[in-house]
Amino acid sequence: MSRPRAQGWTFWIGIALSLLLMLMPLPTLVQPLKPYWPALVLIYWSLETSDRVSVGLAFGVGLAADLLNGALLGDQALRLAILAFIVLRFRSRLRFFPMWQQALAVWLLLLNNHVLQALIRAFAGDAPMPALSWLAPAVGAIIWPFVFLLLDDVNTRLRGKAT
Amino acid sequence: MALPQKESTPIFSDATAGTLRLIVYLALAAVLMVLDHRNDWLHRARYVTAAAIVPIYKLAAAPSDWIHAAGTAFTDRKTLIDENRQLRETLMLAQARLNRMNAVTHQNARLKQLLDTQHLLGMHAQLARLIDVQLGPTRDRVMLNVGVREGVHTGQVLIDSHGVMGQVVETLPHASIAMLVIDPDHSVPVVVSRTGLRGVAHGTGDTGKLVVPNLPLSSDIKPGDQLVTSGLGGRFPAGFPLGTVTRLERDPSGMFLQAFVKPAAELERSGEVLLLRDQPDPVGPPAPAPQFGPPDTLAPDAVAARPRAASAGAGQ
């Protein structure tokens, strides 16, 4: 009873923090390099447990993100739903990848996400994204091991305390 | 959540069901995006949920505020003294300029009264603070801490002490979103203050650069020229500095010049800004001037002129 609840808390707090991090400004020079935090947190949780993250939940998180800082309602919902779908489909393989391979997979996932974003912006008639932002998926992949270890550590600690 | 689904749908395998669900969500997202693009749902949704959303923005802006506060707290004495002296100099300079401006304003007011102008243009401005959050992937929109309840409405012009910053594009009850002049979707009608050459300055998405395209090759403009708003179009009041021409080059077709402009406003700095309360002069030609000169009755063909003058008076 208390174990899923503790995990539920960490899950929702993690999602909320990732949305806050997404809103937080960085110095102008490194601004375009900012990784897409909600995607990283969703990837971690869909690898960690099979029953918590679903395509629908990713869709919901995306809608919340759109409401907070999107230009178009449904844009991030679509991208996160696709991301969650891919991760859940290849979950059993991704879980047992060594860390560097996992980071590579995360890079591909984020790159796919970025391409979709560029496409959606082009369709909506918005201005194209700055060229430097194409490095953001790589930054996401580089920090992925740290995100993974941090979330994993918090998760195991809380689980150990709860049982 | 997925488990009962697995048992209750024997028609499809798990993978097929997952793919179907994905397709449903993708369709839903596509429909949402199209509807939002047409009807501006996002703005309305933000407006309705503003009570919950604005605190989140404030929370996200808090760390950068703390960093600023910490920066102020730990600045050493010498820096503060230097800054103080510099500020005092700037203040004195500004004061001197203001005094001169005052004299000019008084003179202007006298002249206007002399000309029996209908109304004096008094600029009312409202102080607003920027909330430091990132909206969208680029940094050409800013959030302000005043909204509809404080009397802000879409289209109000945002300035700082150096020049035009942008305009309000979206309003929430206690916050609003402004588009900066560097946004690629933003354009300002401008005029070169030295020669009176007119143009339209577009944003480039690049901080610190605007572009004025389609200037004739023979036009009298050179690097260092000051651009001010022209007031055409009725959105921006005339005479506010926009920026300085930094570079001129031919556009890709070779038929026109384009001027690159460095904005005068300090778009990078966060802090206090001014929202202009008064809308600029209404669009359209000015009201007809009152008649000067001797009355019509003294005209040589007074008989012919009188009915015309009467009908003109009735028309007004």
Image (spheres, coloured by chain):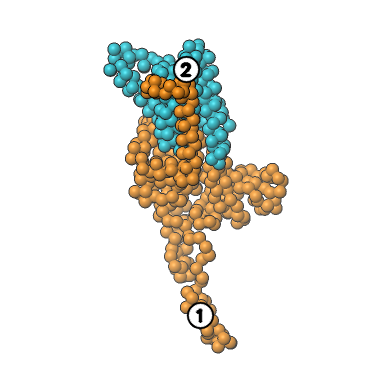
Chain colours: A cyan, B orange
The chain letter for the residue carrying disc 1 is B
- Near mark 2 (Cα within 10 A), the count class, few <14, some 14-19 or many ≥20, is some
The residue where tag 2 is placed is: A91
The chain letter for the residue carrying disc 2 is A
Element marked by disc 2: helix
Q: Which mark is residue B1?
A: none
For image coordinates 52% across by 28% down, the residue present is A113
Element marked by disc 1: helix
The residue where tag 1 is placed is: B311
Which image quarter is the C terminus of chain A in? Answer: top left
Q: Are marks 1 and 2 on the same chain?
A: no
Residue A139: x percent and y percent?
Answer: 52, 23
- Near mark 1 (Cα within 10 A), the count class, few <14, some 14-19 or many ≥20, is few
Q: Nearer the viewer, residue A60 or B112?
A: A60
Kind of residue sitting beneath label 2: Arg
For image coordinates 60% across by 54% down, the residue present is B198
Furthest residue toward front: B11
Residue B172: x percent and y percent?
Answer: 38, 44
For image coordinates 47% across by 74% down, the residue present is B316
